[in-house]
Image: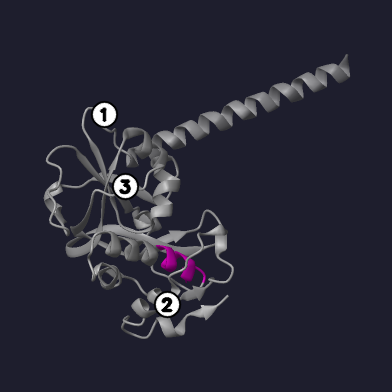
Amino acid sequence: MEKFGALGIMNVKRWLAVVFCLGLSGSLWALDSSCFPKVDTGQPQYLVASGMMMLEAAREKKLNKAEVELPVWVSGYQRGWMARVVEKAPARTVLGVTPEEGKLFNGLLLASSDRQISSLDRNETRTCRTLIDVRQLKSMAGGHLPDKGQFWIYVVKPKSKSKPVSKYPIQQSDVDNFLTGCLEQSKAFSLPQFAEQCVDTTVGWSDHWTNDRERPSGGKLVQNKRVQIDKLLERLEGGFFKKVRNE
């Protein structure tokens, strides 16, 4: 009986611990949800893609769709290597976007849905989703922007914003995926300068940059546009691409 009683007490303690953890997780999620405003399901939904989501394979994986509405100029925001990954390996600095008056970058406007947005929200730890005024978007392909709907962009949280350093470098596989997406859109919309504009409107290029092409970290997508990508990167000022170190 004493043994049974002890086991029973242990089980109760374990159950209480689980309840406490679940409650804590719920409260943390509630705090986190302040980054992700409620979507108006009565309106069409659109996302501004600034980095990896310009890659067709990434859109298929994350949104279960490959369609693009329009390539767009996005004003009042800056894209750069500024989002630090610390919660999972490999530790590195990835692309992010932050509000910046007078700045501009080229991206994609994607039609979306509340379900797709909710799915993206659940996997975001470094960014918050915020509304962007459609007047800050300009079509690069001559088409008209939708006149109704909510337009969202993910911006880097202040606590996650940091420039690349030796412990958190830019990784070549991330660069390859980003620029492959830019090359895809350049071809799809007959915009010869789109990929070059991706490089030119991205800040934060650094000599803290590692070459993981032969063994991409995290099982990243295999690229086949290396020659074109290398040519694009040669245009960087400061000779950063020539300094890329092998892992």
Hey, which quadrant is residue 190 in on the image? bottom left
Residue beneath disc 2: 227
For the point 29% across and 33% down, the residue is 38
Range drawn in magenta: 167-177
Q: Report the residue at 57% width, 32% height from top.
A: 21
Q: In the drawing, does residue 16 fall left or right of residue 120?
A: right
* Quarter placement of the N terminus: top right
- Residue 246 is covered by the magenta coloring: no
Question: Label 2 vs label 3: CA separation?
Answer: 26 Å
How many tags in the picture?
A: 3
Q: Residue at x 87, y 20 (%)?
A: 3
Q: Amino acid at mark 3?
A: Glu
For the residue marked with disc 2, what is the amino acid?
Val
Q: Mark 2 or 1 closer to N-term? A: 1
Q: Find residue 17 and report its image quarter.
A: top right
Query: Looking at the image, do the residues carrying marks 2 and 1 touch, with CB atoms under 8 Å apart?
Result: no
Q: Are marks 3 and 1 in contact (CB under 8 Å)?
A: no
| Residue 89 position within the rendered picture, expressed as x and y whole percent measured from the top left | 56, 58
Per the rendering, the mark at residue 41 is: 1
Q: Find residue 43 and report its horizontal and vertical position in percent.
A: 21, 32
Per the image, label 3 sits on a secondary structure element best described as: loop
Q: Nearer the viewer, residue 154 or 8?
A: 154
Residue, disc 3:
67
Closest to the camera, between mark 2 and mark 1, is 2
